[in-house]
Image (tube, coloured by chain):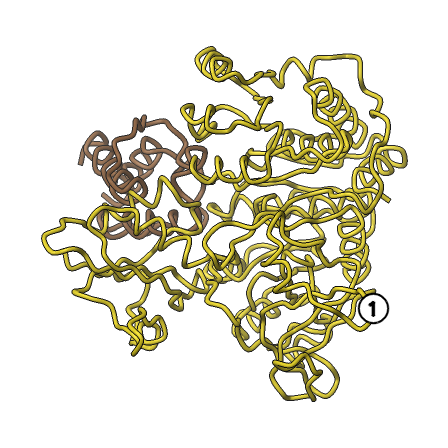
Chain colours: A yellow, B brown
Amino acid sequence: MQVEEFLENSARQYPNKVALIVGEERLTYRQIDEESNRLAHALIAAGVVRGDRVVTFLPNSALAVFAIFATLKAGAVFVVLNPTTKPDKLTYILNNCRASAMITCSGGRFPPDLTSWTQRPHLRSVFMLGASEVQTATLRSAGKSLIPVEEVRQDTRNIQPPSKKCIDIDLAALIYTSGSTGQPKGVMVTHLNIVSAATSITTYLENTADDVVINMLPLAFDYGLYQLLMMFMVGGTLVLHDSFAFPNVVIEKIIRERVTGFPIVPTVSALLLQMDLSKYTFPNLRYITNTAAALPVEHIRKLRALFPQVKLYSMYGLTECKRVSYLPPEQVDIRPTSVGRGMPNEEVYLVDKNGNRVAPGVAGELVIRGANVMKGYWELPEETARCLKPGPLPEEKVLYSGDLFRADEEGYLYFIGRKDDIIKTRGEKVSPREVEDVIYAMDGVTEVAVIGVPDPILGNAIKAVLALRSGAQITRQDVLRHCSSRLEDFMMPRIVEFRESLPKTESGKISKRMLASEPQDSADVVTSAV
Amino acid sequence: MPTRDIEREVHSFVISNFLFDQSVDLEPDDSLLDKGLIDSTGVIELVDFLEERYAIKVEDDEVIPANLDSVRNVAKYVDRKLTRVA
């Protein structure tokens, strides 16, 4: 099975059912299938062939949904980027995956810039909604073909799907994730990977066509993306929203649209728990899922009290295999600190440094075996070899997660920590190196260390500690302004601190361990020497 | 305080806290959300600023785009709150 068949099957089975609610729009399966077919034909007409990468750079919107399915229908590989990605990183990713086409829009913060098109030599076609004359002229003068999405949508022909080109071991997506080296890595995901993970997850969540799931997480984030894919797989309805900035708006949508599934990250639960929800009832809400970072036990206790009839799923995963484990809801009061056991059709186990399985209670690295495990990182053989290692069968590869866990006698997993220094903030992974590289590029900065410090809302807040060249005049605002034009929003430092010099190890390297062990200011107290 | 002055103060708060003093065109009616200027923590910072600066209490159900999603809406909202208090 291929991923676009999630949509095609549901369009056959429930053609007139509302599949997607976004803003004021309500779209049926048939409408989405036809829109995606039109866009797929337009991609093919623009020269996109089987295996090409097509970047989707959009807010959570109907067009983002069409773009993902159109790319798959064209036999290509979708690459969904976070809408807050800045120009340099956009260029890096477009060039890294050699995307031949990009689907984007104009208006608000889009498109992010008009200047760098010539630095993206592989990109031939840009499909843009709402392109202005200036944008059209700029793109065309850079040798790119600009295709207005409005024209594609008005095309009354081409509502049938293009002929199938792929098999299920072909790539369906590249999902970019933070790498410890500082450059983002493209996780290679096949159709089979997605179908396997979505089948396992919808099985334990007991999803059916009656489900209505709300998603306000970016579709660039696999947790957000899968809400779309899984609802279309089971023929349910997705309520797509753009942010949790105004929690009341989301709460009202949950009630009005009779939402049954509410996926959250700990930052969302922290914000929910600050609100007075006593005046609301949620008669249709069936489950809440949490992943990306562990829910504090206090959150679990309060969420259970607020939503006593709702099943609460604590889960754990990584983009490289989508999901690893889930805690059956009936266990959440018994083992609140556990993230559960492996999901259906997947095996997980813990190993020591030599790859030998460890006994219950002993810390080990979590290893994942299953059809959901990625094919590797795009064109990064060494990084791939570090996490995809030989498994129990000859020639088999299993995923070493880099996360340390212990398991109890019954196999329930308890997270201990990561082997690298990746920071989890707002449920997203941030490479300290990526933030440090950006700050090091400022003239006058001699030393930088970026660490995560505990924060009640964000989980971890990003803290940057800097030393400056003598006489350099750099303020906190300068650092943040510099970062804001280069880093996605979730990567932005919250705390900026200036020092004469940074603590060092005996070998002279900056010691993050020493920085992290110092008493931390809370994230809302911003310290600055300037 | 005239709404105009509130608008000016809110504008400079947004420029300083969400744009880090970048020189960017920000019209009073621009949606802070669509411009990518605020997220959930940004809204919390904005609410904290309003409560402290204008000595008002921003209720949970007032944290909605109609009140807080543009500089002009924020100024009008604060003005209404202050008038009610007075």
Mark 1 burial class by Cα count in 10 Å: few <14, some 14-19, many 20+: few
**Location of residue A325 in the rendering, given as x and y in whole percent from the top left corner:** 70, 68
Give me the chain letter of mark 1: A
Image quarter of residue A326: bottom right
Q: Is residue A201 left or right of residue A299?
A: right
* Vertical arrangement, residue A63 with respect to residue A190, above or below: above
Give the residue number, with chain letter if any, for mark 1.
A394
Q: In what element is the residue under mark 1?
A: loop
Q: Is residue A466 left or right of residue A28?
A: left
* Vertical arrangement, residue A236 with respect to residue A381, above or below: above
**Location of residue A192 in the rendering, given as x and y in whole percent from the top left corner:** 80, 50
Residue at x-position 64% and y-position 29%: A63
User: Which quadrant, please, contains the N terminus of chain A?
Assistant: top right
**Location of residue A297 in the rendering, given as x and y in whole percent from the top left corner:** 55, 75
Q: Nearer the viewer, residue A258 or A9?
A: A9
Q: Nearer the viewer, residue A221 or B60?
A: A221
User: Which quadrant, please, contains the C terminus of chain A?
Assistant: bottom left
Q: Nearer the viewer, residue B70 or A322?
A: A322
Q: Residue furthest right?
A: A13
Q: What's under tag 1, amino acid-wise? A: Pro
Image quarter of residue A401: bottom right
Q: Nearer the viewer, residue A467 or A112?
A: A467
Residue at x-position 84% and y-position 22%: A160
* Vertical arrangement, residue B22 with respect to residue A435, above or below: above
Residue at x-position 34% and y-position 46%: A483
Image quarter of residue A57: top right
**Location of residue A22 in the rendering, given as x and y in whole percent from the top left corner:** 63, 34
